[in-house]
Amino acid sequence: MIDWSAEPRTAAAFSLRQVTIQRQAFTLGPLDLDIPAGYVTAVVGANGSGKSTLFRLLLNMEPYDQGQVELLGKPAADADADVELKRRIGYLAELPHAYENSLTAEEKARFASRWYPSWDWSRYRKLLRSFDAESSDKLRKLSKGMRRKVELACVLAPNPELLLLDEPSSGLDPFAWQTMLAELRRFMEQGDRTIVIASHIPDEVKRLADYILFLHRGRPLGFYEKDALFDSWRTIVLSAQEGASAESDLKRVPGVQGWIRSAPGIYQVETDRADDAEAFLSSQGYQILSKQRMELEEILGCLIRGEEARR
Ligand SMILES: Nc1ncnc2c1ncn2[C@@H]1O[C@H](COP(=O)(O)OP(=O)(O)OP(=O)(O)O)[C@@H](O)[C@H]1O
């Protein structure tokens, strides 16, 4: 997990300090986050963990009860008044806006182009073509995936500094999904852009993210550099010699998250400190049979189990 107090500070796309939203049935935070500018951060968590709420609070669509939010170097509380600040941000909501139902894609784009001075019509038309989403129908008549493609073209056309994407691939077919990944990578190639993406799709997170923020029940479970995360979280399969006190040794494995006995004398250990765990097990006389990277959902499952055990 990244300890920001020990890291050299890179510029933050946004920072949260002790931010809390208190609702009757849901609390978000307290959140202390620095989301680095110039990278893709994926926000990962189960349904209802607070991903969409986090996006909405950044845009002042969800009032927060405590704390400070800084967005692109400015206090986010000013964002309502600060039109220029909002124009530097592209936001793709989880669900389409009902008030756009009776617009065509062209009308929606014309509306958005008035808001964003950086709107690029040739870029918009190219995006629509690459998504194969050119249509003169009203948005309510488009399929879910077609409408998502139009929304993606609209959010990318002004080339904003910060893109907040809430489950952007929802409804996309596999071909459109590949196109979306390619377009988002192209967007990041500019070098000074930031994407924060909420996603339930492990492959999407693996392919796009530089950093991963895990949320659970409105609380952060950790903020990780992606490659370091997948390098350090492993399932190690080991064999124990007869008479070894495996069950007490396994509790002492560095970074142990859980373990099971899969066959007589064979154990599987999950750890978030793979190298240290391997060295420990070897030093205790265990034979390492295999090591596997853990999947994103397995890591999230371990983090949630740990958090629930602490509650
Ligand atoms: N309009 C609303 N009124 C009241 N509670 C809400 C509203 N929208 C969301 N919530 C609650 O806020 C919590 C967080 O919801 P949020 O939509 O942020 O989660 P999420 O992580 O984006 O979920 P999902 O993966 O299902 O999209 C949930 O408990 C949800 O019930």
Image (tube, helix red, strand yellow):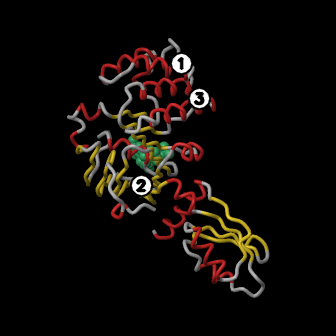
To which residue does mark 1 refer? 129
Report the quarter where the C terminus lies.
bottom left
Task: Report x, y in % for residue 155.
Answer: 42, 28
Task: Report x, y in % for residue 13.
Answer: 33, 45
Q: Residues within 10 Å of mark 1 (few under 14, many from 20)?
A: few
Whole-angstrom CA distance, mark 1 to mark 2, is 39 Å
Element type where label 2 sits in the image? loop
Q: Residues within 10 Å of mark 3 (few under 14, many from 20)?
A: many
Q: Amino acid at mark 3?
A: Ala
Whole-angstrom CA distance, mark 2 to mark 3, is 31 Å
Q: Amino acid at mark 1?
A: Arg
To which residue does mark 3 refer? 176
Task: Report x, y in % for residue 201.
Answer: 57, 44
To which residue does mark 2 refer? 218
Q: Furthest residue to the bottom?
A: 243
Q: Earlier in the sequence, mark 1 or mark 2?
A: 1
Cβ of disc 2 within 8 Å of ligand 1? yes
Element type where label 3 sits in the image? helix
Which label number is shown at residue 5?
none
Q: Earlier in the sequence, mark 2 or mark 3?
A: 3
Does residue 247 lie above or below 15 as drawn?
Answer: below
Q: Furthest residue to the top?
A: 136
- Contact, mark 2 vs mark 3 (Cβ under 8 Å): no
Task: Report x, y in % for residue 253.
Answer: 59, 76
Element type where label 1 sits in the image? helix
